[in-house]
Image: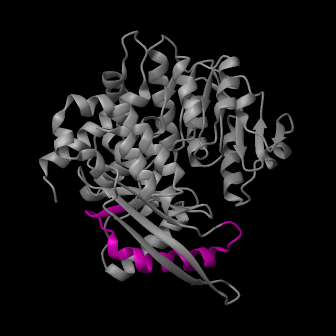
Amino acid sequence: MNLEKILSDLEKRNPGQEEFLQAVKEVLETIEDVVKDNPKYEAANIIERIIEPDRIIKFKVQWVDDKGKVHVNRAYRVQFNNAIGPYKGGCRFHPSVTEGGLKFLGFEQIFKNSLTTLPMGGAKGGSDFDPKGKSPAEIMRFCQAFMAELYKYIGADIDIPAGDIGVGGREIGYMYGMYKKIVGDHTGVFTGKGRNWGGSLIRPEATGFGNVYFAEEMLKTRGENMKGKIVTVSGFGNVSWGAITKATQLGAKVVTISGPDGYVYDPDGISGEKIDFLLELRASNQDIVKPYTYEFPNAQFFEGKRPWEVKCDIAMPCAIQNELNLEDAKNLINNGVLCVSEGANMPCTPEAMNHFLKNKILYGPGKASNAGGVATSGLEQTQNAMKLNWPSDEVEEKLHKIMKDIHEACLKHGKEEDGFVNYVKGSNVAGFIKVADAMIDQGVI
């Protein structure tokens, strides 16, 4: 394949969509040899087909605030690829949401879902609506207005949305309630539902749990484990909470969290009641982490900074895309980091990622290391279809096995001649082959 031409043409068709272009470039660079060695992929024009979404649904959402003022927001659903199963991916409510950003997330979701081995295609959606500062009644009215349009394009065997930034159990409840009222059908069309109406145990923690399990598998390749390791984590939402909880259970000490206002360093470790406080902090809807230091005065707050300057053995970026740059990567390596495992989607810039790989750092890309969330969503779909609920230990056992299997797939396709495992290449190749082969099997449709 002519990689340079493909990327050049893609940039012309998608001007200004830097995150989407970044994600596509990363994947195509790592699967180039596989495509060259398998003429069937070029014959079926798989690359040009897989980088173009099946469809992008764009619509306005009109809603009324508590004072009677009418507001209008933009909303999207990017249904990217359903070769191996119904579309599956979260909904994000945040002012930064754009069509290009959702295309990046939907494209990543194709390969992440493929890696889980579950029958799920890739999609993503959301709106530039900001839940911050809104009353519960305003959020409910927005969610209902959002679903009054989206319901036309989703279904339990068509497209199954889930939560993401700005969309938690409350928002999913409001959207699902509206969907059920319009369609008159109580099916598993959403994941991340409340436990008392079809949700799965450990779903909120699953992305963070899976991230730690993946990091542990990477460490095992060098005779290491989580016990006694110092861990830095960014963010303080569900992913961070799950990662902190599981890392602590496995004997590590987590010393940081972060938010838009800066980061907190707690030399005593974040455990016990401190983990419980994270739930209160997240529920406060303030989007800041400084209040942690009011509750636990031994901790320090560093305004406007990121936690990657703190000495650690393991770094887990769990906040947002491109939050860890080349300078941060150099700081981590100079401070002796052993492993970087991404809890967020593409949180490392390309320069940072390449620096980790160049220095032979254990580096788990998000599409592999944070696949535990969507994997558990897939398990929720299975429970809904079977009309039952598994206990938490059974769900976690299945999640742990899925993360081990993802790691094995990365080893198979990412091990280099000198023994170093390039998990970026391994995850992209493993995810691509399954989807590409399914596309060929199903013909040009």
Image position of 84 with respect to 267: above or below: below
The answer to whether residue 175 is left or right of residue 289 is: left
121 inside magenta stretch? no
Q: Quadrant of residue 343?
A: top right
At a point 75% along the width and 52% down the height, the residue shown is: 288
State which region is magenta.
132-160
Q: Residue at x 81, y 47 (%)?
A: 290
- Residue 148 is a magenta residue: yes
Residue 382 x, y percent position in the rendering: 28, 52
Is 132 on the left or on the right of 251, as rendered?
Answer: right
Question: Does residue 269 appear in this view?
Answer: no
- Between 259 and 230, the one lying in front of the other is 259
| Main SS, magenta residues | helix
Residue furthest out toward the bottom:
68
Q: Position of residue 264 (x, y in %)?
A: 77, 39
Q: Kindly tell me whether residue 258 is visible in this rendering.
A: yes
